[in-house]
Amino acid sequence: MERKGTAGSVVQQFKPAVIMTEMDMTAQTQAIDIAIDALRKHTTEKKIAAEIKRAFDRKYGGKWHCIVGREFGCYLDHGDNCFIYFFVGKFAIALWR
């Protein structure tokens, strides 16, 4: 089920915060920038996650995975240097390959 959020209004007040990462600084910055852009364009978590995932698929190859939401827990395996968990405003984002 796709949940509609208020992503557009959150972006105006966003503060990116990296919680956990195994990713170089360049990739971290790109993940945050792509996420902010996706939040500006889309109003559902599903569309935001799809845009972030597809951008990393194109840029870094392989099959990336992305979860976006306000409340979720996860426990996952990931490749070396291919994981970031961060917040942009009230949205948590997990991105990994």
Image: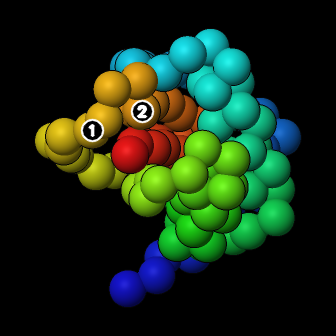
Vertical position of residue 34 compared to residue 30: above or below: below
Residue 81 screen position, x and y as percent: 41, 24
Q: Which residue is rendered at x = 48% and y = 21% of the image? A: 23
Picture coordinates of residue 38, whole percent (x, y): 74, 56
Which dot marks residue 78?
1
Q: Do the residues labelled 2 and 1 touch (CB within 8 Å)?
A: yes
Which of the labelled discs sits on residue 82, or is there none? 2
- Whole-angstrom CA distance, mark 2 to mark 1, is 6 Å
For this orientation, the residue located farthest to the top is 25
- Give neighbour class at mark 1: few <14, some 14-19, many 20+ (Cα, 10 Å): some
- Where is residue 6 shown, x and y percent of the image? 67, 62
Q: What residue type is labelled 1?
A: His
- Spot the residue most to the bottom: 1
In the picture, measured across the screen, residue 77 lies left or right of residue 12, that is: left
Tell me the residue at 55%/16% (across/down). Answer: 24
Relative horizontal placement of residue 50, taking residue 10 as reference (left or right): left
